[in-house]
Amino acid sequence: MKLKMDFNALPDKVPSIPSGIYEAPVTGIEQAMNKKETGYNLVVEFTLGQESGELAGRKIKDWIPISTPDFPNNANQFSEVKLKRFLRSANADLSGDELELNDLLGSIVKFTVSCEVSNDEVSGEVIERSSVQKYIIPD
């Protein structure tokens, strides 16, 4: 079997999401173990909409460290503030001590994105990374 296509037309990289303010629905959310297996993150996925023009359909994720009974010291003050800002931005009910994560699916959240450029230490290749920096709480 042969694969036939113009291989030169394939992109070398996916363009980063430019720095700016975005408003998008939560399209995925889960509590997941971090890469070092030292605690959990709340992993939130957003899908940019039509108002984002050529970025429509692009996804961006945020990994917010959280403290849990089995990893009580995983989060720091900054991640705790970020978590609360996310929850308030998503209009989550914070009156109790439990929250059903799936209830946040579809919530429209406003946030800032930062795009940072660096060089890979091994290859020297230029790397662009977009990340959610801050959640904007509605008035």
Image (cartoon, rainbow, N blue to C red):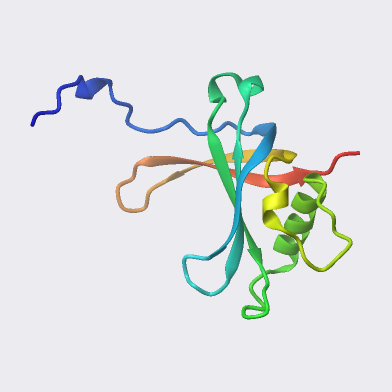
- Rendered residue at 14%/28% (across/down): 3
Q: Residue furthest right?
A: 139
- Does residue 77 sit above or below 123 in this rendering? below
- Rendered residue at 67%/32% (across/down): 20
The count of marks equals 0
Q: Residue 53, image x and y in percent?
A: 59, 19
- Residue 44 visible? The answer is no
- Rendered residue at 46%/44% (across/down): 118
Between 127 and 109, which is closer to the camera in this rendering? Answer: 109
- Rendered residue at 91%/39% (across/down): 139
Q: Quadrant of residue 70?
A: bottom right
Q: In the picture provided, is 47 more to the left or to the right than 137? A: left
Q: In the picture provided, is 122 more to the left or to the right than 47? A: left
Q: In the picture provided, is 84 more to the left or to the right than 18? A: right
Q: Quadrant of residue 19?
A: top right
- Does residue 53 sit above or below 23 in this rendering? above
Q: Residue 4, image x and y in percent?
A: 15, 22
Q: Residue 123, image x and y in percent?
A: 30, 47
Q: Quadrant of the N terminus?
A: top left
Q: Residue furthest left?
A: 1
- Residue 56 visible? The answer is yes
Q: Residue 82, image x and y in percent?
A: 74, 55
- Does residue 63 sit above or below 107 in this rendering? below
- Does residue 34 sit above or below 21 in this rendering? below
Between 114 and 80, which is closer to the camera in this rendering? Answer: 80
Between 93 and 23, which is closer to the camera in this rendering? Answer: 93
